[in-house]
Amino acid sequence: MRSRPTPPGRPTHRRVRGASAIVATAIVATLTLLLACADADSPRAPAARAPATTARRVVPAPWQTLWRRGGGEDTLLLMPVAVAADSARVYVLDAAGYRVVAFDGTSGRLAWLSGRKGGGPGEFSGPVALVPSRGGVVVADPGNARITSLDASGLVVQETTLPDASTARSLCPLAGGALLVATGEDRPLALLAPDGRVERRLPLPWKALAALPPLARQLRLAPTTDGEGCVVALELGHGFAVLSKGRIAVRRPYVESFPLPHVRVERSWRTRTQRLTERRIAAYDVTVVGDEITMAFEGRTRGARHLLDLYSASSGAYLRSYRLETPVNGIARVRDRVYVLSERDGYPTLTAFGTGTAPGAP
């Protein structure tokens, strides 16, 4: 039986397991912390500014391979598009399989599979992003205009359908269960309460982007380690920002920075088409551990798609870069582990690396 349609603009909410109403109340106070970032250049929201772009400092990655999944005859990963991790597991979003694949973070053993193609409960239609949250994982599924939450065993605990999810590109969980969603809307940062209600729409930390078409405002988000803020990284532009505790704590250019993209908009009687005049991909994934922000970067260098650029989360200062042997499609870091989505001999793979060096050490 199909449910009654929801009026336009109002989210529908399916609760599979109960959750404490106290969380929804407590998070309202947390959500208000980000409201001060509504004006990026406001005196109340000071932003750290960087000097001119510096040269990369590429150093050997202090990692050892722990395990690898995928490749060859292993069909567990068909077309992985995103990776995320917590202290127990690493999660891969497999777009071709319309599912989330969870592995034990230490051994690489399969923990569970969740999802299939469709629009029903526990099904996906074009998932694009996922993040760990409250012991499980949250998935953005624009095909169903839905945000889906899975618990630690892969069971669906919440599904929220809302218009913003139809253009979702990236997610950032906040302390208490709130969620910052990067969308293709005119105000592309939507702040969601735990029950899926849009608490507030926030502008970007760069005023110049407000006048550009949505194609130019593609974002990647990642939570800060304390859960109180988010890194906002431009996919097609010059830098990143850190929103933390109610203000723009950092706004910096990438170590390899270039101007904001120019988008050509072509209109006809029934359609409007947006095209980039030049394809200049910057950061296509971002993760945070400790005081380190790690950006998977493309750019124009010989090391494109092999580079990981590291920055300080507290100051935004560029730290160093690693260059990997295989092209990087996604990255997640947790404590002393690094998980990298890549391709080996034409097959998608997930590789776990370990290091005894504490995050932040050179």
Image (cartoon, rainbow, N blue to C red):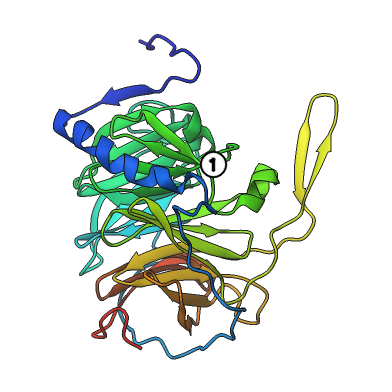
Q: Disc 1 marks which amino acid?
A: Pro
Left or right, residue 23 beside residue 294: left
Left or right, residue 19 beside residue 177: left
Res. 305 image quadrant: bottom right
Query: Observer-nearest residue: 355 or 55?
Result: 55
Q: Using a 10 Å C-alpha cutoff, classify the residue at mark 1 as few (fewer than 14 neighbours), some (14 to 19) or many (20 or more).
A: many
Point out residue 149 in the picture as x, y percentages from the top left corner: 30, 39
The quarter of the rendered structure image containing the C terminus is bottom left
The quarter of the rendered structure image containing the N terminus is top left
Q: Is residue 216 above or below residue 197?
A: below
Q: Secondary structure at mark 1?
A: loop
- Count all numbered tags in the image, as a single digit: 1
Q: Is residue 150 above or below residue 89?
A: above
The residue wearing badge 1 is 188
Query: Observer-nearest residue: 177 or 26?
Result: 26
Point out residue 77 in the picture as x, y percentages from the top left corner: 41, 57
Regarding residue 86, the answer to whether it shows in the image is yes
Query: Observer-nearest residue: 144 or 282?
Result: 282
